[in-house]
Amino acid sequence: MNHEAAHLTDMPQNADGELVVAQTSSGWDALPPGTTATGAQWVIVDERSELPEAARRRGIGEHALAMLEHRGPGAHAQSKDHPLRARLDRSPDGELVLTVPTLSYVEASHDVHTGALTCVVGKDVVLMCELGDAGVLEHAVEKLTGGFPVPDEGVHQVLAAVLLTLVAEASDVEIGLGDAVAAVERIVFSSTRHVDPVEQIYDLKREIAEARRALGPVTTVLPELVAEAEEAEDRRHSQPWLRRAQAWVERLDKHLDGSDDLLSDMLSAHISQVSVRQNEDVRKISAWAAIAAAPTLLASVYGMNFRHMPELTWTYGYPLALLAMLAICGTLYGLFRRSGWL
C-alpha cells in the first residue's frame, strides 16, 4: 500500500518534540513552534513514555493519568511480549483513555504488521501516540488539515478522523490480502504451475489470522464508544459515524473470514489434485508393469531349457515368438489407452 501523506517529522514541532494541530476559524492547522492555541488541540508525541507527561502539562485529570500510566503499552509493534489489546476507560472527570491496535500490509512479502494507538481525550485537548508502521496519525493529520470532510466537532472530530483512518488502513490490508489470495488461487488451479502452493497458503492463513486478531479488539472498542455516545445526550450526533465504522470493521472481519475459508478450500482442492495425480501415476506404472510382464512371462517359458519343448525345431519359431510378444504388448497397450490408464 503506497501512501503519499507527509511524515509527521516533516511538520512543525514544538520544543518538546510534539506536533500540535489546533482548530481555528478556518479549520485544523499545525501550529508553528511558540504559537499558543485558543481552541481545541490535537497533540501527537513520538514515544508512548512521553504521553503521561504531555497529558499532565495540558491539564488532564489525575484519574485519567493514573489509568494511562498503569495501563501497559497495549499492542506493541511486532512484539510478542505485548499482545494485541484494546481498552476504553472513562475517568470520573469524563476524560477518555483509549488503546486500539493498528494494521499495515507489506505487498512485497504479504506480511501484516500490527501496532498500537493510544490516546487521551479531554474536554478541549486530545493527545495521541502511535507505535508501528501503519501511519494512521500521518494520514489522519493530512485528512483533517487538508479540509476533507470529517464528522463530529472539536476533539471528537479528531477521534473520528483517527478511527475512520484506522479502519480505512485495515480495509487496505484486507484488500491486499484478498489480492494475494486470488493470486494463490490462480496458482492452485493453473495447469502449468511450477511451485507448490501449500507454503503460500499457510503463510496467508497466518497473516489473515494476525489481521483478525488485530481487528477483534477494534470490534470491541467501537460498541463501547457507541454506548458512550448514547449515554451523553449532547453527543448523539456522533453515533452515525461510529455505527458506520463499527459496521465497516465487522464487514472487514467477515471478508477476512471468507478469505480464510477460501484458502482452506484451496488447500483441500490442492490435496485432492495431488491425490488424483498420484492415482494416475499408480495406474500408469501398473499398466506399464503389466505390458512388461507379458513378454517376460513368454520369454521365461522358452528359457527353461527343457529338452522336449514345442516349436524348438521350427525355423520360424524365434521370430514368431517375438511377434507374439509384440502382439501381446500392443494389445495390452491399446486396452490400457482405451481405459484411460495410459
Image: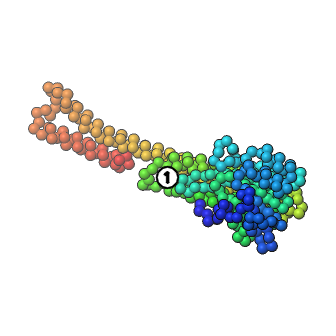
**Residue sitting at x 22%, y 34%:** 299
Image coloring type: rainbow
Residue type marked 1 = Val
Q: Secondary structure at mark 1?
A: helix
Asked if residue 209 lies left or right of residue 154, the reply is left
Q: How many marks?
A: 1
Residue at (73% x, 61% y) in the render:
14
Indicate left or right for 195 with 231 as reference: left
- Where is residue 15 drawn, in percent x and y? 73, 59
x, y percent for residue 167 = 69, 59
Image position of 142 with respect to 50: above or below: below
Which of 112 and 332 lies nearest the eye of the viewer? Answer: 112
Quarter in which the N terminus is drawn: bottom right
Is residue 142 at all visible to an observer of this figure? yes
**In which quadrant of the rendered view does residue 44 lie?**
bottom right
- The front one of 119 and 333 is 119
The residue located at (80%, 65%) in the rendering is 36
- Whole-percent x, y for residue 128 in the image: 75, 56
Residue 156 placement (x, y as % from top left):
80, 62
Q: Nearer the viewer, residue 254 or 342?
A: 254
Is 170 drawn above or below residue 32 in the view shown? above
**In the visual, does 320 lie left or right of 249?**
left
Q: Is residue 306 left or right of residue 87?
A: left
240 shown above or below 250: below
Is residue 157 in view?
Answer: no
- Number of other residues with Cα within 10 Å of mark 1, as a class: few under 14, some 14 to 19, many 20 or more: many
* Residue under numbered circle 1: 188
* Residue appearing at x 84%, y 50% in the figure: 64
